[in-house]
Amino acid sequence: MSLYRRLAPLLLALIVAACGFELRSAPKVPPEMARTYIATDERHSLFYRQFRRALENAGAQVVDSAAEATAEFAILTDVTGQRVLSVSARNVPREYEVYYTIYYTARDGEQVLLEPQLQTLTRDYTWNETEVLGKAREEELMREAIVNDLVRIVLIQLSAIEPQPVPAAPTADE
């Protein structure tokens, strides 16, 4: 094996390290969200299940009541569905759009950690009545991909929250 072939991986590693390249690590939640309660009416939704799992993987403990929590993540809206985008000359749907919308906020007691946010992601797919089972599975996979993207967006927003300084206790001089 030539000297160049042996040195090429080492040279590539040095170049990548020198430019400051760093793999993105998993988002971490702020310390205020160490024990988080997720307030929602949709405890069986795909977003809730994926978000709860991701929050736990990010280092937070998800608790079952607001009294036990240090922070509350409120899912105000959790809606998914599909819309017809186009139809054929015979008025048969040919293209659909799958959408998922969430509206949420995060609080630490009375302090707002994250202002109310609205996120909607969509994907579209073509429909063929001869491939009903395959297209149904395609829609299901698209919805899961959308939710994974939404969870990632929310976690990145939460990880960007700056920890709040603890106010100093008053001294006897004050």
Image (tube, rainbow, N blue to C red):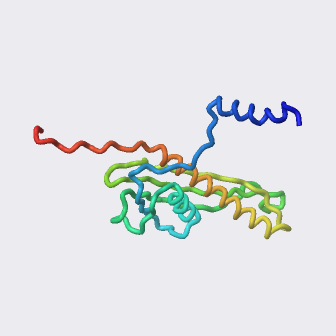
Q: Could you say which quadrant of the image residue 81 lies in? A: bottom right
- In this view, the residue in front, 112 or 62, is 62
Question: Which residue: 31% across, 52% down?
Answer: 110
Residue at 62% in and 56% down: 148
| Residue 9 appears left or right of 144 | right
Q: Residue furthest right?
A: 1
Q: Tell me if 72 is positioned left or right of 78 in this view.
A: left
Q: Residue 167 placed where, x, y %?
A: 26, 43
**Residue 101 placed where, x, y %?**
57, 56
Horizontal arrangement in the rendering, residue 21 relative to residue 130 (left or right): left
**Residue 55 image position (x, y, % from top left):** 51, 58
Position of the C terminus, as image quadrant, is: top left
Along the line of sight, the residue nearer the viewer: 1 or 112:
1
Query: In the figure, residue 11 lies in which quadrant?
Result: top right
Q: Is residue 16 above or below residue 80?
A: above
Extreme residue toward the left, this view = 173
Please state, as top left, top right, bottom left or bottom right, where the N terminus lies in the image: top right
Among the 4 quarters of the image, the one containing residue 61: bottom left
Q: How many marks?
A: 0
Instruction: Give the residue at x 45% y 63%.
Output: 62
Q: Residue at (53%, 63%) from the top-left corner?
A: 48
